[in-house]
Image: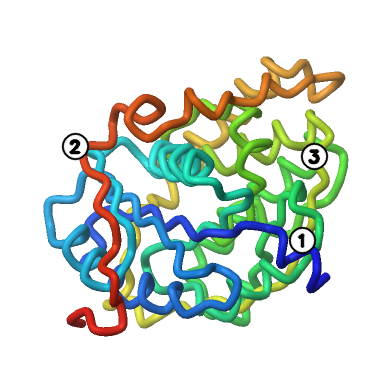
Amino acid sequence: MVIALCFMRICAIIPAYQAERNVGDVAREALRIDGLAGAVFVVDDGSTDRTAERARAAGATVLSHPENLGKGAALRTGMEVALASGFDVAVTIDADGQHPPEEARRLIEADADPEALVLGIRDLVAAGAPRANQISNRISNFFLSLFVGRPFADTQCGLRRYPLRRTLSLDGRDEGYAFEAEILLRAVAAGVRIVEAPIRVIYPPEDERLTHFDSVRDPARIVRRVVATLALTRGLRHVPAAPAPVDDALRPAAASPRVAELAPRPPHPSAAPP
């Protein structure tokens, strides 16, 4: 495991929208995770607050969309730039502070296969998640497990470990929250090895929570995307992955025209202001 991890170039991708309250702390803690080698990309998805400023001050590399496009678009931009920068694997971390840094480390160490898709598995009841979130997750888990013919314990957790080249080759199309469910379906169809790893998650008091996920509207959008993906993949039978992207086509300027800014992180992130 140790030898395999030494040869796996790993980074973190943090999609962020209007996240100035927490993104600096999340990026700062991610930079301290062993195995990431200080490689943290924050994708500012069209925020109008100080999200980019706080992330940059924490030491992250900031990628910016000129307008809000959605979580899926932010993840795809981060993956394209990370792959073009020479990374093999990315751990995705939500910007709201719900994922403690040691849990990201747990996903890094969960499996030695750089081609595996590793899913973080939350205990929403023990974590005190809002009841609406628990119900939404149970419904999503039930239907996605039914569609793919194998049980999944948590299909909505944003803490995941993605094999970059393989994930991009799956050609996920959704630009919103449904991207993660779509990628899971396409990964099953393409025969990607999927690993599940229990993680701890933090739900702050309701008045301190930051979320842009609508527990009614967004699950409906996820269902629509799942149905469309199932139709496209003919029920997940014999579906080849799309051709792997070519490195030259994944250079930041060409692969992600939506990215308006690519700012290198400061040389001494530990000295950055809070």
The one nearer the camera, 195 or 89, is 89
The one nearer the camera, 228 or 243, is 243
Q: Mark 3 points at which residue?
A: 192
CA distance for labels 3 and 1: 13 Å
- Residue depicted at 83% across the width and 46% down the height: 193
Mark 2 nearby-residue class (10 Å; few <14, some 14–19, many ≥20): some
Q: Mark 2 points at which residue?
A: 66
The one nearer the camera, 64 or 59, is 59
Residue 135 visible in image: no
CA distance for labels 2 and 1: 35 Å
Query: Considering the numbered disc 1 on the image, is that residue within a helix, a strand or a loop?
Result: strand
Image quarter in which the N terminus is found: bottom right
Image quarter in which the C terminus is found: bottom left
Q: Position of residue 176 (x, y in %)?
A: 42, 38
- Residue depicted at 72% across the width and 50% down the height: 117
Q: Name the residue under label 1.
A: 196
CA distance for labels 2 and 3: 33 Å
| Above or below, comparing residue 62 to residue 56 in the picture | above
Q: Which amino acid does label 3 sit on?
A: Val
**Which of marks 3 and 2 precedes in the sequence?**
2
Q: Position of residue 52 (x, y in %)?
A: 21, 58
Query: Considering the numbered disc 3 on the image, is that residue within a helix, a strand or a loop?
Result: loop
Q: Which amino acid does label 1 sit on?
A: Glu
Residue 259 visible in image: yes
- Residue depicted at 49% across the width and 37% down the height: 220
Mark 3 nearby-residue class (10 Å; few <14, some 14–19, many ≥20): some
Q: What residue type is labelled 2?
A: Pro
Q: Mark on residue 244? A: none
Nearer the observer: mark 2 or 1; the answer is 2
Judged left or right of residue 266, residue 169 is right
